Image (tube, grey):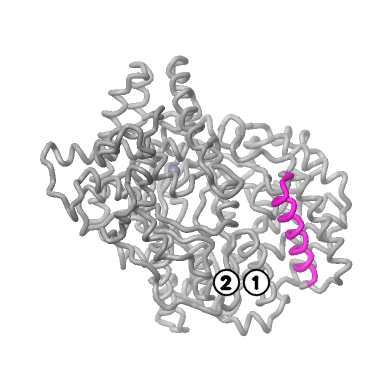
Amino acid sequence: MASRPLAVVVLLCTLPALAQSPAASEEPKGNVRFSADMLDKSIDPCVNFYNYACSRWKAQNPIPGDHPGWGRFNELQERGEYMVRDMLQKYSADDPHRSGTEQKIGDYYQSCMDESAIESAGARPLENELKAINDLKSKQDLAKAAVRLQREGAAVLFSFSSDQDFKDATQVIAEADQGGMGLPDREYYVKTDAKSVELRHQYVQHVQKMFELLGDSSAKAAAEAKTVMKIETSLAKAALDLTSRRDPTKVYHKMAVKDLATLSPSFNWTGYLQGIGAPLTESLNVTEPEFFKQMSQAVKKTSLSDWKTYLRWQLVHATAPMLPSKFVNENFNFFDKTLSGTKEIPPRWKRCVRFASGDLGEAIGQKYVDLTFGAEGKERTLKMVQLLEKALSQDIDGLDWMGPETKKQAQVKLAAIGNRIGYPDKWRNYSSLDIVRGDALGNSLRANEFEFQRQLNKIGKPVDKNDWPYPPMTVNATYNAQLNNITFPAGILQPPFYDKQADDAMNFGGIGAVIGHELTHGFDDEGSQFDSQGNLRNWWTEQDKKEFESRTKCVADQYSGYPAVADLKVNGKLTLGENVADNGGMRIAYMALLSSIAGAEPVPVDDLTAEQRFFLGWANVWCQNRTDEFARMLVTVDPHSPGEWRVNGAVSNMPEFRQAYHCKADAPMVRQNECRVW
Ligand SMILES: [Zn+2]
């Protein structure tokens, strides 16, 4: 659950990889529905609520070998993957009666699953791409290579796409952003602690091996890997850190195209913009001018031959999952095993389900929705959203630190929030995307180009609020500050988040608090800088802004004290927006529950009162296990806190929690200086 713009949307398994699996599970793991048997009654909820709610689940649910972590989200996600697999298998037979959509999703999956064809083709599918790199004649031609490779999905030099204009939300403009690195974030290149130095060493070894797999000698490949590291490090040093990127003013620099060319003179911008496929435009957002200045320096200082090395690496890195198993395994060994602690590669079908879902998400999603989510699901969720919106409105009215002027603006913003529930009103049209049976890599490259072009086609057109950022089977939810709307896909509107068989208290603590979480993103440290129309505009009085900042500082300090993994603590500033949203979401979901109960005390279920069950509804969705490697990665790149702190951090700020569980004033789950924003 991440907010847009600027924040990274972190799913729980983001790094794809391929090859065979020794131990493919044939059944989805875990029991998704909550039961009181999950509670560890030997633990006092006032001492450690997370352990009371989750320690039994954690003991009974070790991390499966093919995952870097395992939580309630993953259980649900995996169920969805089994369902999608069965559907894709059904359409993968070469049947002339299939519809256009069925042909695309079926043939994509069939091609991806056909390992023997992929093995026998070897690296041949890359030949044209490698030749195009080899044929570059001058550094001016780097623009041509960037066009070709970026369109195909390789992260070369920087990233280019479209975005709403931060200051005029009705307009979609072109945007150039930092990029070009193989490691997950700039911090991996610049941190000086022993673990980071070791990871960089292992990364260079990995890059070397990939060059060897392309046929280069060990000595040549070793030198090439060093070149790649040198170029990527220069880009990383010029890039802005993730915490700074949460500040919209730091990533909004709209300028004339000719000024970008002046700022970054060694890169051929004219050639790039003519080739990239964007409508002609006079201006664009250059998120971080300093990055492009330094990138230009790197272009100037680095030889053409070294650039060719870098481009070859980015190409093989981007395409590895669709190449023969030696590439797949080497890619897995570094990115999943070394970096995230995953022990074994996921079975091929899972990887192909994920690639198909990434490349043809709404084609698959349309069928998934037919199977799982009816119109009544949409209606029920919408009703809950309305209750949460009402609670947030009452909460804003009652704030003692916010003045009437800002309150009025906050109410306008809240009333304008759009709700997207379940699935899009109109499905994406994939008819111009060719999916060819037997061409796994080609399908993937064409799908990347299709998506790249689809994003560029938005430039200069009115914003399409029906365009969803991810397919409906996704187990996630988001708030988008520029659209001022929330998105709740069908994938998350299921147990344990929402359970038709559970009582209101559990559901308000689960999906209710998640809805509240997303709504309050509109009012977190980042979202609060955008107005009701999605424009970056201050609507706060100076005094109220100060009050807001001192309250969010309390939250940042609180979470900065929590350990994430052995030697690392949570980054309270990077996770601030999410922590504010967790705390606010819980509070308004609790208010909504009380108003839906309307004074009548419901009968306890499993000897637990409605109030107690509400907090369990929240804790239950965050039960999780993570490898140390994965926890280490997330503390750097994930704007969310670990599950333990999403639970204990939020409940320990709530007097309602201590009342529900009759905690003593000095209990560990009772914070002495509790933080409260919303
Ligand atoms: Zn969030």
Quadrant in which the C terminus is drawn? top left
Residue at image x 69%, y 70%?
A: 330
* Mark 2 neighbour density, 10 Å: few (under 14) some (14–19) many (20 or more): many
Q: Are marks 2 and 1 in contact (CB under 8 Å)?
A: yes
Q: Examine the rendered structure and indicate whether residue 232 appears above or below residue 372.
A: above
Task: Judge whether residue 671 can be spotted in this image.
Answer: yes
Q: Is residue 500 left or right of residue 248?
A: left
Q: Which mark is residue 345?
A: 2
Kind of element beneath mark 1: helix
Does the magenta-highlighted stretch encompass residue 204?
yes
Q: What residue type is disc 2 on?
A: Ile
The stretch in magenta equals 192-212
Q: Which mark is residue 235?
A: none
Report if the beta carbon of the residue with label 1 is closer than 8 angstroms to ligand 1. Answer: no
Report if the beta carbon of the residue with label 2 is closer than 8 angstroms to ligand 1. Answer: no
Task: Judge whether residue 423 can be spotted in this image.
Answer: no
Q: Position of residue 397 (x, y in %)?
A: 28, 23
Kind of element beneath mark 2: loop
| Residue located beneath label 1 in the image | 328
Q: Position of residue 412 (x, y in %)?
A: 34, 27
Of callouts 2 and 1, the N-terminal one:
1
